[in-house]
Amino acid sequence: MQHCQRVGLTKNIYNEKYRKCLSKFSIGSQNEINDERGMKEEDVEFYFFVTRQGYGYWGIIIFMKVAGLGQCSLDNLFVVDSFPAPDTKKEVIEWTTAGGGPVATALAGLSRLGMDCFFYGIIGDDEAGGKIADSLRLENIDITGLLKRPVSDSQVAFIAVEKNSGKRTIFWKRPSAGPLKPDELPDDFPADTDFLLVDGLMAEASIYAAEKARKKNIPVMLDAGRVRKGMIELAQMCDYVVASEEFAGELINNGNSFEPEKAIMSMKSFGAKAVTITLGDKGSITASGNEIFQTPAFKVDVADTTGAGDVFHGGYIYGLLQKWDIKDVVRFASAFAALKCKELGGRAGIPALEEVEDLLK
């Protein structure tokens, strides 16, 4: 019988009960782990593993928990051979409906990587709301914090995808009901969560959630899609800010001339541990400490880029929870997002950990 030290795993190890990827593996008594991490008994379980080398391990699994507060959507995606000119007709090649939304899709990616995920947001009492909830349950995401607003419409999107390039144009509508309010979150929010992700659309609740997380020393990431009301204040409260090119361009107000280096320097003023701007097929640029570096995009056969940024955020959080170097974090997130683009929709193509590792070799 061999012993191993506490490590962050880079290989998928599954157990028949949960079919979940393990994030931590330790040797010792359950009491020792509870004392060390302040964990509850339901958070740790004993398992016996046999590795490829035939060694046996008694181990303790500690499931990492990620909470997300933000948008969830029902996406209607259709593929066309090219984007049509105004006032013309265009036949659709393929059509599908799937769950979407920045935070919701990031959590879907994290759940597939073995994290326990908890979503907080709103839906309406319409058909779309039911489908959104079902799509989150299908990803094993806890939706206790998903509130259903009566007599209201859920967030929906119509997404046109160009067949040969995979580029998309999104038309979306906010939910008709009011946003999630701080007093609708649980009193102990975010409880014993290991990480919090927010997108800032529901500004008041997002700022409140970030404040609560900071008091508990829980790291917070902002998915910065647009410069909206309250977004800069929220960014200054977050440990990590991962922004779209659109957000970065609006931040420096450069019109049609976008300079990533100038934008990333502006984002450094937020005071976050690391800030990243995603640049589509041009990769990303990141500032951490005194270092600024670029990470190229991985080349894959692209079917649809919808949700790529969201999946990138999920991969980023996964790497941070593994305590990897920031360059390895961004590279993993890039590979995770690239592989998603091989399928239509924001979630259908989210890869398994082994697929990402193969691409990273």
Image (tube, helix red, strand yellow):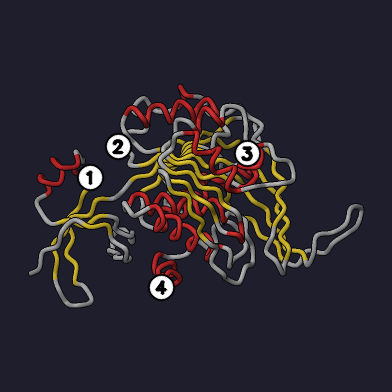
How far is mark 3 from mark 1, CA to CA?
A: 39 Å
The kind of secondary structure element at disc 1 is helix
Q: Position of residue 204 (x, y in %)?
A: 52, 25
Going from the N terminus, do you reach mark 3 or mark 4 first?
3
* Pointers 4 and 2 in contact (C-beta within 8 Å): no
Q: Which of the two marks, 2 or 3, is nearer to us in this view?
A: 3
Q: Which of the two marks, 2 or 1, is nearer to us in this view?
A: 2
Image quadrant where one finds the N terminus: bottom left
Q: Is residue 186 above or below residue 276?
A: above
Instruction: Specify the farthest residue to the front.
Output: 290
**Mark identifier at residue 42:** 1
Q: Position of residue 339 (x, y in %)?
A: 52, 66
Give the side of residue 82 with respect to residue 37, left or right.
Answer: right
Foreground of the two, 184 or 86:
86
How far is mark 4 from mark 2, CA to CA?
A: 35 Å
**Residue that badge 2 annotates:** 192
> What amino acid is found at the position of numbered circle 1 in the picture?
Glu
Q: Residue at x 31, y 51 (%)?
A: 323
**Residue that badge 3 annotates:** 226
**Mark identifier at residue 120:** none
How far is mark 2 from mark 3, CA to CA?
A: 30 Å
Neighbor class of circle 3 (other Cα within 10 Å; few <14, some 14-19, many 20+) is some
Q: Residue at x 59, y 46 (%)?
A: 244
**Residue that badge 4 annotates:** 361
Give the side of residue 140 with respect to residue 132, left or right.
Answer: left
Neighbor class of circle 1 (other Cα within 10 Å; few <14, some 14-19, many 20+) is few
> What amino acid is found at the position of numbered circle 4 in the picture?
Lys
Q: Is residue 104 visible?
A: yes
> What amino acid is found at the position of numbered circle 3 in the picture?
Arg
Instruction: Specify the farthest residue to the bottom.
Output: 53
